[in-house]
C-alpha cells in the first residue's frame, strides 16, 4: 500500500514520533558498531561511515548487478530458489560478511601495527582510511545511482492517519536484534574476553586472553554493524531515497554526536544517544520548520551537532561514558 | 669567551653548551647559512637570473604555472604552522581548522570586497585591513571555542571540533548575504595593495609588470607577498614556541595535571593556543580564498581540515620546519601525480617504450587501467583527482605507521647517520 502522510497536528506528532524512533534506531546501530570498536581497541573510527557506505554498495552489487565487488565473477547467491526476499536476506548477510572482511583487513594492516602508539595517531589513520574508502565507493555510485532492491520497497501501512513504512519497522527490528545480540555476546566466553580487554589490555593478556583476536572480532563486528546502519539508512523513506549515495557516508558523521552524547565506551549510551539524536533531528525538523528562513534550509541536519555541543558542556564524558581519571 | 657562551659553531646537531644556544632559533652557523642561502634562492626563484634559473629543481618551480602551485604551498604552510602550534606544541587535537579558515575567509570578504547589488555585504577596505582582520576574526572564533577544550579532552575534543566543521558548512548556507549563493559563492578581493580606497593601487597585484630590470608576472608578485608572510609568521611561531608561553603549552601537552600543579593556568594557555592557531588559520583561509578568486561555502569542509592535519603529521608534529616540509610534500604530490599521468598519456600516444605500461595503467573508457584520463570517470577507474585524494589517505596511513615523526623524522635519521661519518658512532 502506498503511504499517505497526513496533516493534522496530532498526526504530525505521531508521524514525527514514528520517524524519530526509526531514525534513532539507525543512529543507535551505527553508534553501537562504533562503541564496540572503541571499547575493545581504543580506536575512534572515523572511517565508520565510509565502511557502512561500502557495505550498502556491496549489497547493491550483490543483488542488483548480481556480481561480486572488485572481483570479475558473478554472484553465486544471486538467484536462489524461493521468493525474492529469501535471496535478498541471504545476500544481505553475505554483504555483512564481506564488510566484516573489509574490517578485518583494515584492522590487520592499519590498526594492529599501531598498538601502543598515541590514540590520536590511530584516529588520524582512520581518517586517512575514510578518504580512501569513500573515494572508491563514491566513484562507484556517482555516475549511476545504485538501488538496493529492498523487498518491501517504499511500501508501508497506516495506523489511523499515521503512515508507517516497512523500512521503519525493519530498522527498529534490526536495532533490537543488534542490541540484544550484543548483550548476549558479552555473556559468551569471547564476549567476556572482550570486556576484559576493554577494561585493561595488559591484565587481560596476563590472563591468557588473545588481545589480537579480540581486536579482530571487534573490528569485524563493528564493520558489519556499520554496514547494517549504512544499508538501512539508504532505504527508501530516508533522504538518499532508496539508493546508495555519496551522502550516505555522512550519516555516520551525524551519528558521532550520538556516540559522544551517550559516552564513547558505553553500549547503553549508544542506544540512548542514538535515540536522543534521532528525536532531536526529526522533531526539530517538524516543529521549527516555520523558522527555516532564519535557520537555513536543511538545518535539521546540524541539530545533532548542536545537541552534542550542549550535552558535552554539561557532561564532558557523555551520559554513560567512563570519566577519565586524571593522575599526575 | 667562556665555555658557557660558546655555542656549536658548525657541527654536531643537538650538542649544546649553553642554555642560550639551546633555545636559539638557529643554533649553529651551518644552519644560519643554510637558511640564508635557501631564502636567497627562494627570493630569486621567479626571476630569469643566469645561475638560479639553471638549478634543476628551482628552474622547474620558477615557471609561472608552477608558481601558482608554489603559492598554494605557501598558503597551506601558513595554516599548517598555525595548526602545529595547537597540535604539535600544545597537544590539542583539532579537526576544526577548516572552520577557522572559513571564518577568516569570510571576514576578509566582508571587509575587503565591494558589496554587489546590495544583497552581499562588503566594505571594500584595503588589504592591510582585511588580512589582519581575517586573522582577528578567526582568533575570536578560537577564543569562543577554547573553553570547550578545557572541559572536553582528547578524542572527545576531536569530535567536538569535527562538529564545528559541519556547523560552519551550515552557517555558510544560512548567511547567504555573506557567503553568496550556494554552490557559486562570491568573489574575494584581489591582493592589490592600497592605502585606502583610491583608484590606482600602490602595488598592482592583479596583473604582471616590470620591476627594475625584470618582468614579473602576477603570480610572482603574489609569491613575494606570500613568501614574506610565510617567513614572518613562521619565525613568530618558532619564537613563540621557545618563549614562556611555548614552554607552558608544551607542559600542558606533556601532562596537563602536572602543568597545572606547577602553576601553569591551563584554561588561559589553552585559550592562547586556540587564539593564535586560529589567527594563522584565518590569515591562511583569507589568502586561500583570495588566491582562488572565487570560493563557495562548501569548500571549507572536512577534507580541508584533514589536508592540514596531514601536512602537520606528514611533516612531523611539533616542529615548524616539519610543517613547512609537509606543506611542500603534500601539495606537490598531487601535482606530481598529475604530471606523471600526462607524461604517461603522451608516452601512450607516442607509442614509446613506456607505452605499454601506460596502456595498462591509464584508461579513457569503462574498464582496463586504474587511472582514467578523462575528468569524470565512469565506474571503477578513478580520475586523476580521485587518485590524488586516495593518495592523501594512503600517505597519512603509511607515514603514521612507518614514520610517526614524519618527514622531519626522516631528516633527523639521515642527519644522525652522517653525523659521525666516516665512523659509525
Image: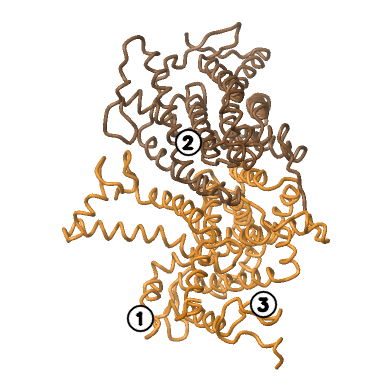
Direction left: furthest residue: B351
Which residue corresponds to mark 1?
B54
Res. B313 visible in picture: yes
Q: Is mark 2 on a helix, strand or loop?
A: helix
> Position of A19 compared to A230: left or right?
right
Q: What element carries label 3?
A: helix
Placement of B33 over or under A136, stated as above or below: below
| Of A188 and A37, the residue lying toward us | A188
Which residue corresponds to mark 2?
A51
Residue drawn at x 40%, y 41% is: A136
Task: Find residue B41 and report its horizontal and vertical position in percent.
Answer: 46, 80
- The mark total stands at 3
Direction front: furthest residue: A207
- The CA distance from mark 1 to mark 3 is 37 Å
The reply to whether discs 2 and 1 touch (Cβ–Cβ < 8 Å) is no
Which residue corresponds to mark 3?
B22
| Of A226 and B40, the residue lying toward us | A226
In the image, the chain rendered in brown is A
- The CA distance from mark 2 to mark 3 is 48 Å
In the image, the chain rendered in orange is B
Discs 2/1, front: 2
Disc 3 crowd rating (10 Å Cα; few below 14, some 14-19, many 20+) is some
Task: Find residue B16 and report its horizontal and vertical position in percent.
Answer: 65, 80
Placement of B225 over or under A287, stated as above or below: below
> Position of B394 compared to B149: left or right?
left
Check the residue under mark 2 and report the chain it is in.
A
Nearest to N terminus: mark 1 or mark 3: 3
Amino acid at each position: 500500500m502506498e503511504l499517505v502522510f497526513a496533516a493534522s497536528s496530532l498526526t504530525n506528532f505521531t508521524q514525527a514520533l514514528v520517524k524519530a524512533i526509526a531514525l534513532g534506531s539507525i543512529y543507535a546501530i551505527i553508534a553501537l558498531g562504533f562503541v564496540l570498536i572503541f571499547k575493545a581497541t581504543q580506536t575512534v573510527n572515523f572511517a565508520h561511515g565510509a565502511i557502512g557506505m561500502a557495505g550498502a554498495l556491496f549489497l547493491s552489487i550483490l543483488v542488483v548487478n548480481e556480481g561480486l565487488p572488485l572481483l570479475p565473477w558473478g554472484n553465486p547467491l544471486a538467484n536462489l530458489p524461493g521468493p525474492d526476499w529469501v535471496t535478498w536476506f541471504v545476500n544481505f548477510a553475505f554483504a555483512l560478511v564481506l564488510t566484516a572482511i573489509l574490517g578485518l583487513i583494515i584492522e590487520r594492516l592499519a590498526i594492529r601495527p599501531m598498538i601502543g602508539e598515541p590514540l590520536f595517531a590511530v584516529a588520524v589513520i582512520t581518517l586517512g582510511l575514510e578518504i580512501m574508502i569513500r573515494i572508491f565507493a563514491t566513484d562507484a555510485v556517482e555516475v549511476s545511482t545504485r538501488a538496493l532492491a529492498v523487498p518491501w520497497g517504499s511500501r508501508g501501512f497506516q495506523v489511523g492517519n499515521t503512515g508507517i513504512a516497512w523500512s521503519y519497522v525493519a530498522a527498529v527490528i534490526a536495532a533490537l536484534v543488534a542490541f540484544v545480540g550484543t548483550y548476549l555476546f558479552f555473556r559468551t566466553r569471547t564476549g567476556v574476553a572482550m570486556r576484559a580487554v576493554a577494561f585493561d589490555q595488559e591484565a587481560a593478556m596476563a590472563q591468557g586472553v588473545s588481545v589480537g583476536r579480540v581486536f579482530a572480532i571487534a573490528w569485524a563486528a563493528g564493520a558489519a554493524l556499520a554496514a547494517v546502519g549504512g544499508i538501512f539508512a539508504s532505504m527508501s523513506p530516508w533522504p538518499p531515497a532508496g539508493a546508495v549515495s555519496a551522502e550516505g557516508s555522512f550519516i555516520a558523521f551525524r551519528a558521532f554526536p550520538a556516540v559522544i552524547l551517550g559516552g564513547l565506551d558505553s553500549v547503553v549510551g549508544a542506544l540512548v544517544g542514538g535515540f536522543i539524536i534521532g528525536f532531536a533531528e526529526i522533531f526539530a525538523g517538524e516543529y521549527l520548520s516555520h523558522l527555516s528562513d532564519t535557520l537555513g534550509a536543511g538545518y535539521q541536519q546540524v541539530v545533532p551537532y548542536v545537541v552534542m555541543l550542549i550535552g558535552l558542556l554539561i557532561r564532558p564524558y557523555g551520559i554513560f561514558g567512563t570519566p577519565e581519571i586524571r593522575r599526575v | 669567551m667562556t665555555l658557557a657562551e660558546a655555542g656549536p659553531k658548525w657541527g654536531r646537531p643537538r650538542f649544546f653548551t649553553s642554555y642560550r644556544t639551546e633555545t636559539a632559533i638557529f643554533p649553529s652557523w651551518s644552519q644560519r647559512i643554510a637558511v640564508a642561502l635557501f631564502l636567497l634562492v627562494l627570493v630569486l626563484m621567479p626571476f630569469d637570473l643566469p645561475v638560479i634559473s639553471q638549478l634543476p629543481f628551482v628552474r622547474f618551480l620558477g615557471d609561472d604555472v608552477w608558481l601558482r602551485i608554489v603559492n598554494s604551498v605557501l598558503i597551506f604552510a601558513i595554516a599548517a604552522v598555525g595548526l602545529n602550534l595547537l597540535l604539535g606544541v600544545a597537544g590539542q587535537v583539532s579537526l576544526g581548522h577548516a572552520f577557522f579558515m572559513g571564518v577568516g575567509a569570510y571576514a576578509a570578504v566582508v571587509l575587503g570586497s565591494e558589496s554587489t547589488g546590495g544583497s552581499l555585504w562588503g566594505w571594500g577596505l584595503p588589504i592591510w585591513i582585511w588580512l589582519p582582520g581575517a586573522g582577528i576574526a578567526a582568533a575570536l572564533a578560537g577564543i569562543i571555542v577554547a573553553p570547550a577544550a578545557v572541559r572536553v579532552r582528547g578524542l572527545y575534543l576531536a569530535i567536538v571540533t569535527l562538529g564545528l566543521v559541519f556547523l560552519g558548512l551550515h552557517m555558510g548556507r544560512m548567511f547567504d548575504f555573506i557567503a553568496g549563493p550556494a554552490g557559486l559563492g562570491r568573489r574575494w578581493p584581489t591582493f592589490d595593495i592600497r592605502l585606502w580606497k583610491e583608484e590606482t593601487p600602490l602595488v598592482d597585484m592583479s596583473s604582471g609588470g616590470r620591476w627594475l630590470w625584470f618582468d614579473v608576472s602576477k603570480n610572482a608578485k603574489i609569491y613575494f607577498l606570500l613568501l614574506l608572510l610565510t617567513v614572518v609568521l613562521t619565525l613568530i611561531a618558532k619564537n613563540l614556541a621557545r618563549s614562556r608561553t611555548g614552554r607552558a603549552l608544551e607542559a600542558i601537552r606533556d601532562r596537563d595535571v602536572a602543568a597545572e600543579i606547577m602553576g601553569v593556568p591551563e584554561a588561559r594557555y589553552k585559550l592562547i593556543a586556540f587564539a593564535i592557531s586560529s589567527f594563522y588559520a584565518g590569515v591562511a583561509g583569507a589568502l586561500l580564498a583570495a588566491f582562488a578568486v572565487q570560493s563557495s561555502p562548501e569548500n571549507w569542509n572536512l577534507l580541508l581540515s584533514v589536508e592540514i592535519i596531514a601536512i602537520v603529521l606528514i611533516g612531523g608534529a611539533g616542529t615548524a620546519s616539519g610543517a613547512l616540509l609537509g606543506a611542500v610534500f603534500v601539495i606537490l604530490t598531487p601535482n606530481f601525480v598529475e604530471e606523471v599521468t600526462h607524461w604517461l598519456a603522451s608516452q601512450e600516444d607516442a607509442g614509446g617504450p613506456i607505452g605499454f605500461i601506460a596502456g595498462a595503467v591509464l584508461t579513457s573508457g569503462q574498464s582496463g587501467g586504474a587511472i582514467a584520463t578523462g575528468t569524470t570517470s565512469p565506474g571503477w577507474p578513478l580520475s586523476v583527482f580521485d587518485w590524488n585524494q586516495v593518495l592523501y589517505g594512503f600517505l597519512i596511513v603509511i607515514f603514521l605507521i612507518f614514520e610517526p615523526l614524519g618527514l622531519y623524522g626522516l631528516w633527523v635519521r639521515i642527519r644522525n647517520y652522517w653525523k659521525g661519518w666516516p665512523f659509525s658512532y
